[in-house]
Image (spheres, coloured by chain):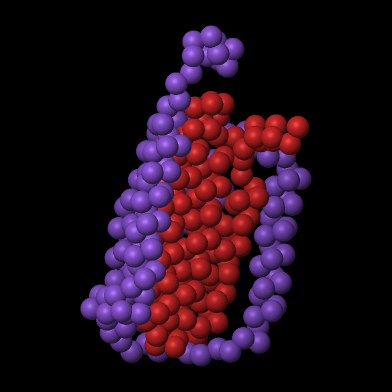
Chain colours: A purple, B red
Amino acid sequence: MDIYSILFWFLSAMAVGSALGVILSRNPVNSVMFLILTFFAISGHYIIMNAQFLAVVNIIVYAGAIMVLFLFVIMLMNLNADVEPQKGMMIQLAGVISGGTLFLVILMGLTTAKSELIDTKSSDIGLISNLGKVLFTKFALPFEISSVLFLSAMIGAVVIGKKEHIPASEKAEIV
Amino acid sequence: MPVSSTHYLFLSLLLFSIGIMGTLMRRNAIIIFMCIELMLNAVNLLLVAFSKMYADADAQIFVFFIMVVAAAEVAVGLAVIVMMYRKVHSVDINILNRLKH
């Protein structure tokens, strides 16, 4: 068993275990912590597959920015107490069965998929110089369009999150 | 046993199914949102594995764009959840079923 296989199985067990922790833990803050652990495991997979740039971006953007945003919202709403009402046992069972059935169906469909051994030699595809060349030549237009997407998302978030002005007479009946 | 592309296929399929189970099981809107992020990451992992398999950089650029879209989605989605919390003082999605009446 070479070092690549050992790392693969270790990171896979870490990713799946902490993904189960996300959906099973009762406290939302614990869920966020488990999700960050899952992202670190996935970043480890990126590193052993020679996608170093994506590994770093994954940690900075997902674990660093997005999950901190989630934590801020959870702390803001004071949800870290165990107050979430549970769905009924039947509905939870139905969720597990439908997810498991999807897993089995795609698993059976993929057993005949073409399988190639992963090349464990290092390559320079995932380095930032190579990716930058591809991004700014072949994918220059989608790159520019994504900046428009970001601008509209920013404006949308501000517009949605803005406090509405409610007249005092209506305020009484809402509360 | 050497690692093949099928291993990565099954690993990301498992992560994706866990995300779907979480989306169907939980009632907290924030946890459901986190499970969607988990599913996006499962797909990213598979794209990187195929990029390694075919020695092609295009798939990694696609992963980059998926991350861009996910960041924009999180900003808007969390604004919607904060707004919902401000209106009904809860993030329980069962409260929203009054939309059907």
**Residue A41 location in percent, x, y?**
40, 64
The image position of residue B34, as x and y in percent, is 50, 50
Q: How many marks?
A: 0
Q: Is residue B11 above or below residue A74?
A: below
Q: In the visual, does A160 lie left or right of A109?
A: left
> Is any part of residue B5 visible from this angle?
yes
Q: Position of residue B39 (x, y in %)?
A: 53, 61
Q: Is residue B33 above or below residue A108?
A: above
Q: Residue at 29% of width from left, 71% of height from top?
A: A53
Viewer-nearest residue: B2 or A163: A163
Residue B25, given in percent of the width and then of the height, sits at 65, 48
In the displayed structure image, the side of residue A20 where residue A58 appears, left or right: left
Residue A32 visible in the snapshot: no
Q: Is residue A72 left or right of residue B80?
A: left
- Examine the rendered structure and indicate whether residue B79 appears above or below residue B33: above
Q: Quadrant of residue B98?
A: top right
Q: Quadrant of the N terminus of chain A?
A: bottom left
Residue furthest toward the left? Answer: A129
Q: Is residue A174 left or right of residue A150?
A: right
Residue B91, image quadrant: top right
For the point 66% across and 87% down, the residue is A112
Task: Identify which residue, A14 or B13, lies in the foreground.
Answer: B13
Image quarter of the C terminus of chain A: top right
Q: Residue at x 58, y 89 (%)?
A: A114
Q: Residue at x 32, y 83 (%)?
A: A125
Q: Dividing the picture into quarters, in which one does residue B61 lie?
A: bottom left
